[in-house]
Image (cartoon, grey):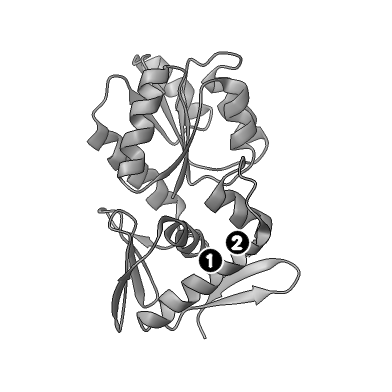
């Protein structure tokens, strides 16, 4: 799962990035509103953690612009402003949740799981496990389970698998997959995607899954059942 973290407190930003990464998330971090808006409009994130008081553009301005651009990525506003009217304003602007500083990491993780469950069409369980057809994927343990057993995936393989699991049956463009798995600032070659698709197909076969990753000529890839 890919997260955009927009927080101008550099110490908090680094601490959250480290903690979220340790829990299996891939995090792109920025420190101001302009960068948050730029990255958010790439529409490649599963959730955005958005500080309300950002330099250049406030978090509420970023949120409004994203929603006006039809970017429906779940957004959790993070702020020190905890009055009821502040929460109502944030939610009315399109935030999916509102978290007041200081907060416990476990609460943040629970809220991330909550908003992504609501946004996902697959069976996302409270412990973060994702079930689809005949497989179960654990992002935290990096473990894929199927009818014939289980196997461990690399971080890239896991992020690629989760991109498909959260959009079952949909065709994902090559550019979208490269952005979601490698990030907007990566100079990775397109051939790397084909290699990881090959690796992931082998993983699915190893656990006995009937799910298949089909090549949609000239567009990208889609995960389907036979």
Q: Where does residue 74 sit, x and y in percent of width and height?
A: 48, 41
| Residue 3 badge | none
> Which element carries disc 2, helix, strand or loop?
helix
Answer whether residue 64 is visible to the viewer in this image. no
Q: Residue at x 47, y 18 (%)?
A: 8
| Residue 119, position as x, y percentages in the image | 46, 50
Q: Residue at horizontal 50%, vertical 81%?
A: 225
Which quarter of the figure has residue 208?
A: bottom left
Front-most of residues 210 and 15: 15
As drawn, is 40 to the left or to the right of 146? right
Asked whether residue 106 appears in the rendered view, the answer is yes
Q: Secondary structure at mark 1?
A: helix
Name above or below for residue 214 compared with residue 42: below
Give the residue drawn at x 59%, y 70%: 222
Q: Image quadrant of residue 78?
A: top left
What residue appears at the point 34 percent right and 39 percent down from the top-left corner? 20
In the depicted structure, whether residue 88 falls above or below residue 176: above
Crowd rating for badge 2 (residues with CA inside 10 Å; few <14, some 14–19, many 20+): few
According to the picture, the residue beneath numbered tag 2 turns out to be 192
**Residue furthest to the right:** 218
Q: Please state the horizontal and vertical placement of residue 174, each as a whole percent of the image.
A: 66, 60
Are circles 2 and 1 on residues that touch, CB within 8 Å? yes
Residue 196, numbered label: 1
The residue nearer to you, when weighing 186 against 89, is: 186
Percent x, y of residue 172 = 62, 62
């Amino acid at each position: 799962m890919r997260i955009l973290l927009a927080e101008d407190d550099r110490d908090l930003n680094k601490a959250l990035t480290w903690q979220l990464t340790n829990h299996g998330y891939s995090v792109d971090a920025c420190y101001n509103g302009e960068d948050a808006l730029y990255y958010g409009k790439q529409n490649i994130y599963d959730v955005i953690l958005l500080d309300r008081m950002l330099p250049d553009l406030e978090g509420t301005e970023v949120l409004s612009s994203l929603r006006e651009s039809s970017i429906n990525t779940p957004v959790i506003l993070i702020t020190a402003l905890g009055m009821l009217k502040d929460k109502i304003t944030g939610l009315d602007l399109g935030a999916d949740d509102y978290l007041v500083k200081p907060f416990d990491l476990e609460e943040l993780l629970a809220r991330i799981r909550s908003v992504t469950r609501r946004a996902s069409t697959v069976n996302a369980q409270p412990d973060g496990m994702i079930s689809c057809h005949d497989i179960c994927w654990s992002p935290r343990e990096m473990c894929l389970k199927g009818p014939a057993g289980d196997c461990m995936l690399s971080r890239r393989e896991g992020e690629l698998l989760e991109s498909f699991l959260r959009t079952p049956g949909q065709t994902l463009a090559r550019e979208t997959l490269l952005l979601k798995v490698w990030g907007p600032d990566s100079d990775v070659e397109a051939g790397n995607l084909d290699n990881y698709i090959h690796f992931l197909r082998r993983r699915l076969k190893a656990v006995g899954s009937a799910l298949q990753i089909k090549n949609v000529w000239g567009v990208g890839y889609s995960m389907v059942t036979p």
